[in-house]
Amino acid sequence: MTSLSHPAARAFDAVAPVFDSRFGSWLSVTAQRRAVRTALLRTFPPGGHILELGGGTGEDAAFLADRGFDVFLTDPSPTMVSLARAKLAPFQGQAEVVAGEEMEEFAANYLAAGGALFDGAFSNFAPLNCITDLRPVARGLARLAKPGSRAMLVLFGTFCPGEIFTELLRGRPHQALRRFKRGEAPARLAKHEFHVVYHRRAALQRAFAPWFILEKRLGIGVAVPPSAAEPWISGHPRVLGAMALLDKIASRPFAILGDHVLYQFRRTTEN
């Protein structure tokens, strides 16, 4: 499909070799990832055929594959996909270089080759925020997902008190309010410039209709702080543990306050 035609893909491809070592040791990331995985295991049918969008180095895909799921990972970064393939090899999982913007083309090629429809799909830690127009993603995913299956999509929250507080403490007020910006917002990683969009719930629902209906939202990182609090928060595991427990209570009623928000969509019978 694609290689590095998208600015965000170039940025993440550049950091891919050190991605796990850089972010994997942060306990705030671990806590948020654990909350997402709990929701995935609770929602997807055991042993299901699962599609991941923007799967990066394959941490979540390998986790699901180790628990009996048949996982197909997609990501626009060739280096990320190479790392993911190595993790999925023991489970015979698949990984392919696919940008979210090209999901329709991928769906057409995958189905033409005899690929089976998926029992569920997910995307973790906001790769969809790197895509301005989510309608091609929704159309492609609609072709690939079985009616009644769930799409579990984790995006950046649009109002995160934890980030506002942390960034103000760090003397970066311009970062504290960045999620309020409408449209494309500048981002930077590994000296590469790209843009992100803080998609609102209404915009997501419009993009995924009529093929998907939003069933519920879960806040991921309502009390658990964002990565901006690292590495300080990793030095206080008891505090972080208490925050993770609070998240279990607050994730549904206070989803809007999450560092990330998990949107659970259900595939309809619409064509």
Image: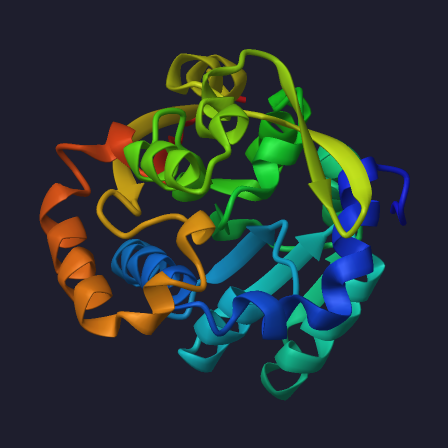
The residue positioned 27% from the left and 28% from the top of the image is 256
Q: Nearer the viewer, residue 143 or 83?
A: 83
Q: Can see residue 270?
A: no
Instruction: Return the residue found at the far bottom.
Output: 90
Which quadrant holds residue 33? bottom left
Q: Is residue 201 left or right of residue 73?
A: left
Residue 217, located in which quarter of the rendered image? top left
Front residue of this view, candidates 215 and 47: 215
Could you tell me which residue is drawn at 63 percent across and 50 percent down? 54
Q: Is residue 211 left or right of residue 247?
A: right
* Residue 208: image location, x then y, percent: 50, 22
- Residue 138: percent from left, percent from top: 58, 28
Q: Is residue 163 above or below residue 189?
A: above
Residue 88 x, y percent position in the rendering: 63, 78
Report if residue 197 is visible in the image. yes
Of all residues, the one furthest to the front in this rendering is 171
In which quadrant of the rendered image does the C terminus lie?
top right
Identify the colour scheme used: rainbow
Q: Is residue 183 above or below residue 137?
A: above
Query: In this picture, is 199 found above or below 4?
Result: above
Q: How many marks?
A: 0
Using residue 100 as the reference point, say whether residue 40 is left or right of it. left
Q: Measuring 74% from the left and 64% from the top, which residue is drawn there?
A: 16
